[in-house]
Image: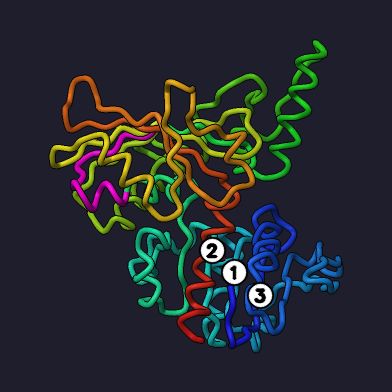
Amino acid sequence: MSNNKLFNVAVVGATGAVGGQIIRLLSERKFPINELKLLSSARSAGQVISFGGQDIVLEEAKPESFDGVEIALFSAGGDVSRELIPHAIDRGVICIDNTSAFRMDPDTPLVVPEVNVDKINEHRGIIANPNCSTIQLVAALKPLYDRFGMSRIIVSTYQAVSGAGQNAINEMLKQSKDVIAGDDVTPAILPVSSLPVKHQIAFNAIPQIDKFTDNGFTFEEMKMINETKKIMDDESLEVTTTCVRIPVVYGHSESVYVELKSDFELDEVRELLANAPGIVLQDNPAEQLYPLATEAAGKLETFVGRVRRDLNNPRGLNMWIVSDNLLKGAAWNAVQIAEYIALEQE
């Protein structure tokens, strides 16, 4: 992007997987930066990260770190966001938060730029980035919601291990080698590192992401339900989810069934999806063309395919949605929001 005004920017959680992608995108997109602060835990402070041909020394994230900062992108966990964002806002910083800390706060816009970019202007110092699985879902469904209306959404996710962090990736790769070699597998991280029971992820599917709530759904599933309603600004939407971890490194896949409020033709549905911002339609069964996590990895778009009318409900529609969970599902969505803020202040 190009902009006459330059901004003082901070990235909180600069050493994490999402933080690293944010830094890369800020560089590749030529975000208008005057000064870039890379903030991390005390443990990582002092490390050096290259950005735009210069070496930047990581600093420990503290309240005073935000003096002079105009835009801050947070991706260091909910506890860090809850602690530091109020201090940043007090210093006049516009915060873009990748955690779940403020998503359901009624005063905090929850934004996917292709869906509700206008909500950014309602911020009170913070804009929340939705859950990775929610982002790709609403990006694909919004053009259909606007054209036909929508009453019900049923989603089953097939989520990459990178959503649980680098240690989960390492565990999956090691387990895969151990299984192939005939060695014993001792799970240590998945499905939830803080819970006592661990399950093998290699050559497996684990129907648990995050802890369970009292209603039998996991927190991940409830995030998708609540966030979808908030982003679509429709509490009447009936949304139900089952979130599953599978042995894929990058790219979340979703099997989605929706019930539309008015009749539709499949050709129009495909046309709407093909022309929707940030969406790539890959839907040619005759040539076995449909979205794959392996091909979506590293790309900024959301991919949609397997579009077909339900056999029992003429207003029911099935589709398959895939996107890179670290990019559109996190870093890219946050940088898109930052770009919008920068353009508005040009």
Vertical relation: 207 (above or below) 165: above
Q: Position of residue 252 (x, y in %)?
A: 53, 38
Name the quadrant containing residue 155: top left
How far apart are labels 2 and 1 at the CA level? 7 Å
Give x and y (percent) for residue 209.
Answer: 52, 37
* Label disc, if present, on residue 334 of the rendered structure: 2
Quadrant (top left/top right/bottom left/bottom right) for the N terminus: bottom right
Amino acid carrying label 2: it is: Ala
Outermost residue, left direction? 262
Of the two numbered discs 3 and 2 in the rendering, the one whose residue sits closer to the viewer: 2
- Residue picked out by circle 3: 10
Please, is residue 118 above or below residue 330 in the view?
below
- The Cα–Cα distance between marks 3 and 1, rounded to whole angstroms, is 6 Å
Q: Earlier in the sequence, mark 3 or mark 2?
A: 3
Q: Which mark is residue 73?
A: 1
Q: Amino acid at mark 3?
A: Ala
Specify which label sits upstream in the sequence, 2 or 1: 1
Local SS, label 1: strand
Depth order, front residue of 334/66: 334
> Quadrant of residue 43 in the image?
bottom right
Q: Secondary structure at mark 2?
A: helix
Find residue 307 and report its horizontal and vertical position in percent: 34, 31
Marks counted in the figure total: 3
